[in-house]
Image (spheres, grey):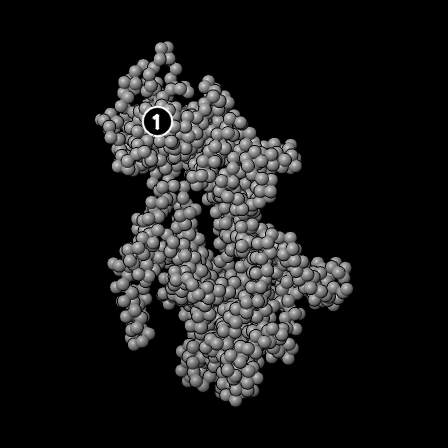
Amino acid sequence: MSLFQIVPDRSQVNKQEIILSIRDLSVEYQTRRGVLSAIDTLSLDLYKGEVLGLVGESGSGKSTLGKAIMRMIPQPGRITKGQLIFKNQDLMQYDEKQMRDVRGKQISMIFQDPMTSLNPVQRIDNHIIEAIRVHEPSVTKDEALSRSESLMERLGIGRRRLNEYPHQLSGGMRQRVMIGLALALKANIIIADEATTSLDVIVEAQFLDLLRELKDEFGLTILLVTHNIGIVAELADRVAVMYAGRLAEVSSVDELFHNPKHPYTQGLLRSVPNIAMDSQDLYRMDGTPPNLVMPPSGCRFHPRCPHVMDICHQKQPWLVRVDEIGEGDEQVGGYDKHLASCWLHQEYQGSTQARRY
Amino acid sequence: MELTFGTLCGGGLLIVGLFLLYAIMTGSRSLRNYVITRLLLVLPMIWILVTLVFVMMRVLPGDPISTRLKPGTDQATLDRLRERAGLDRPIYEQYWDYLNDIAHGDLGVSNNVEQDRPVTQIIGRRLPATIELVMPAITLMLIFGIAAGALSANKHKRTLDYSFRITSVVAYAVPIFWLGLMLQIVFARQLEFLPVAQRINPRFANDFTHRTNIYLIDTLLSGNGQAFGDVLKHLVLPTITLTIALIGVFIRLTRSNMIEVLQEDYVTASRARGVPERKVVYFHALRNSFIPIMTLIGLQVAVLLAGAVLTETTFSWDGLGKLLRDGIALRDYPVVQGTVVVFAITVGVMSTLTDILYAFIDPRIRF
Amino acid sequence: MATTTVEMYVKPRTSIMGTIRKTWRTWGGVSLVIAIILAILHLGVKLDGAKGLLQIWLVFNVLFATALILSSQTVRQARRWHGADWWLAMISGLILVLFIIIGIIPEYLAPYVYDVEAGPARLGPREVPANYILITRVELPYENFADIGYDINTGELIERTSNAKSIAAIDEKANRIVGQERDTAGIKVEINRDATGLQPIEALNILSTSDVTADRGRPLVAIVGEESQFKDLVSEYPNLRIVGTVGPAYKGGFLFGTNLLGQDVFSRLLYGTQNTLMIGISAAICSCLLGIPLGLISGYLGGILDRVLSLVMDSLYAFPGLVLAIAIAAVLGPGIGNIILAIAVIYVPTYFRLVRSQTLAIREVAYVEAAKSLGATNPIILIRYIFPNVIASVVVIFSINVADAILTGAGLAFLGLGLPETVPDWGVDLSKGSQFVLGGEWWLVTFPGLAIALLTLCFSMLGESLSEILNPRLNRA
């Protein structure tokens, strides 16, 4: 119960300004068994100041999307098509050097395991000093040090800790250091890739509180990649649900939890345990995530879908608006809109408003 | 104070001692404990190695006296020789004497290599030559091995990587003494611009004072440029041989360590912070892969000593390795055993030192 | 991620091992029994023809196994995933098969037998020597050079030639024989050194008139001389006859030249393959047989036993292998068995450490825990669950280890601790030849060394590429 009740404060969100726009992005991996399509023609907008939760099962491509935004898809994968519009520039056109200036400075990433994400033989302060000086070579070491000290103070890490090595810190502290690294460069967007998964529940709660405070304080835009619906409910403004490399549903948190449209989202929400629930009510989704080397035809969810129809086998549904369309509301997509890609909402697929989003 | 090999060794020990003292004084408590524990473990380790030598040479079937004598030597002579070597006594007594002698720095007396001279004295005179050969080889190995390994890992599965890998496998597969012989044939015999063997042209041998017996240092101290050049020339082929012998394994090990490190999360994380690729590879990754490389250098000591035996034999280089070979050829049992014991002690000491250095580099190790 | 956790609960199985296992079930057992029977017939009963059958059988099996491996699904699939590594493994593997076949049947491939003095000593590669004839008295029954050599009443032989090389070789031979160890050298022909300075006509006079040479009271039984100088003169002596040319015809010279005994270097290389391979592979197998079980038990059981074993093995590992082998070989004395033992001892720790560390890791993996909870006993867990997982990395190490062992064996031979000089072995040949490097006989060291390098190269290349192919960590996308 308690999980879903916290309504985040959305006052900071600028509903007009899209800070990052992902357009028709596809990522493929060359594997032993063939070409694996990890992300298939995905489009998504990130609004300035929002927290967008990106949820999905393991292997749904949510982490890949995070890496793709940074253009850090490891070999043998590559981005095969699409655009990444950031501040009116297409990141896909950037060369490696320009991209380096974006990484860390504009878009920053926090990884799952804070233990392995910090260089074990480098002291904490050196991590931060390096990060600052890579992007601002003019800053002296002392300046960088004093900047990192005040920053770390804000994050609740004492000056003494800066002299220590990563293994001497606790998991929560390390994750705060990771945030500190992102903040030190005043990044606009932070991609948190399963950033709380390795933390225990209490530390996780503290960490989320901190993240919320920092978001308002620094005006951050956060892409929260996670498989934990609870965290999304607590922190996110909007949610994007990914399934098998495609978006199943995008909407505000409230809307998604109270009125999920896509059968996958419905199943996902019902399979989250809840204290108030009887354990028998817990929903178990049939089947396994699809093999992305040979994805199912049409809608990729159809082999597991309880409402499967003929057309689901044949045609891929588009992501379209599924909420009430107001008067004169021509615009497809947008911050407040509820989108889903499912043939159940066929009327929308067929309507004039149905434009591929 | 006059500079001799003894004072040189003393100086080296002093530096090591100061380093350890520094480690103990300034390091954190855990580092201090580690260094002290590790130092205390040197003696047991040397004891094990030395015992190993004893077991190999005395307890295994076979008998150092009879196997290396001419067939047909009569029983009385054999018995006399055995008695002289103390091989007729019970094994535990022999073992006790053996340990006792080593502890007192007594490695017996040579029978054939240098008649009736204490083995320790012979080793003391040959050691500088080995050091003169080994030091440049190690330096070259570190420089080229790490550079090639890092480059190779950086270009994993690309042409450069494959060519370095093949080079390393080839360098590893070539018998080291054969390589030495081939170098002799090509550079010394056919092209005639480098000397074939020995440490120095006998012409120059008495032109300078033999203080340390490391000729490079001696000739420099005497200010004899010609002799110094000659020593350098003599050093070229053996050093190349030994370096190639060492570098094969080393490139391979640096490469695989680097590849593993490059797949670590913190490498990805620093890339995500926009750290330039070159800095990621040659600073973060290389520094971290240094940690396992440290231990490898400890293990390389073994390869190095084995390589020294073969290189010195090929180039008639009067060091410990050739002493061992001479001991075998002349059936001089005390010399063989003494040299092997010295090798064992070297291995024990070096592995301790690398472990301590390791703890210095890797903050995680100090337990 | 979830997928990796799922994998952890499934008993992993390497497909290459699967192929080998399957093949072994259908063919290996029968084949091995037949090979052992033939080997007993050959070595034990000394049945005529058993050796030939054994050789044919072994070659057939090697070819069969090669074909089987090449045609297997796994190998063909591996080509697509690991292009360059696959090719490296293939090429080195095929060269190794070639070496093995040569090692099994050298006598069918070599132009000369390894210990036959096929031509003049120290002949360079492809160098055509002058034609030599063997002249003896009519009443003596010699039909070739070897007859004289094996005659109990060894006579003296005058070799008269203008070929400087040949004279040098005769000097060498004479020195050796007069100087020491007549029996062990295996050469029973004595050459009168002084006589080499004689003119052809003087030498023939001595042979035809006196049956006792002047200085040492031995009968002169034959002369070896250049055909052009002697042939016409011989017809003037009724009691002398020309037996024939010395050794088989060597019109085209010798591919890799001859050594200082006049033996064909190439043939000795082919014959030497057997001993070199034998030393390398047997030593590696011995190390495996000792190291793997110890590592398994030590890693699995832990406790005091593990501590003690690890300590001993670590010390052994830290010790310079060659030096240790020298010490052991020096004590054990010569002989192929002793050399194999000396080399095997130094590689036990390699397997021990590898197997132990892997056992430690696998012991904690979920499927072993699961097996334990189902009541599997320790031996069953060790054999059925842990061993199959360890063995894949052992295969890789084994291949590299054979290369190591061959190098160590050659090193021992170079230091004078190898096989006896009469036995063909690359290391021994190389070691013997090394004394003549500065005399200009480069072929005596170059070719055996190249052979060793090629063989070790193939073994380590195979191991290297196999590890790259089998190592899932480096290949994961």
Q: Position of residue B270 (x, y in %)?
A: 53, 38
Looking at the image, which is closer to me, A99 or C4? Answer: C4
Q: Residues within 10 Å of mark 1 (few under 14, many from 20)?
A: some
Image point (47%, 21%), residue name: A11
Left or right of residue B36: residue C116:
left
Looking at the image, which is closer to me, C307 or B239? Answer: C307
Viewer can see residue C102: no
Left or right of residue A257: residue B272:
right
Q: Position of residue C469 (x, y in %)?
A: 40, 49
Image point (52%, 35%), residue name: A179
Q: Position of residue C398 (x, y in %)?
A: 41, 59
- In the picture, the quarter occupied by the N terminus of chain B is bottom right
Image point (41%, 45%), residue name: C475
Quarter of the view holding residue B341: bottom right
Looking at the image, which is closer to me, B358 or B159? Answer: B358
Q: Position of residue B366 (x, y in %)?
A: 55, 53
Chain under label 1? A
Above or below, comparing residue C236 to residue B35 in the picture:
below
Image point (54%, 61%), residue name: B303
Above or below, comparing residue A2 to residue C331 in the picture:
above
Q: Amino acid at mark 1?
A: Phe
Above or below, comparing residue C473 to residue A49 in the picture:
below
Left or right of residue C25: residue C214:
right
Left or right of residue A248: residue B143:
right
Q: Residue furthest left?
A: A310
Above or below, comparing residue C182 to residue A61 in the picture:
below
Q: Residue furthest top?
A: A328
Viewer can see residue B263: yes
Q: Secondary structure at mark 1?
A: helix
Q: How many marks?
A: 1
Q: Which residue is mark 1?
A: A257
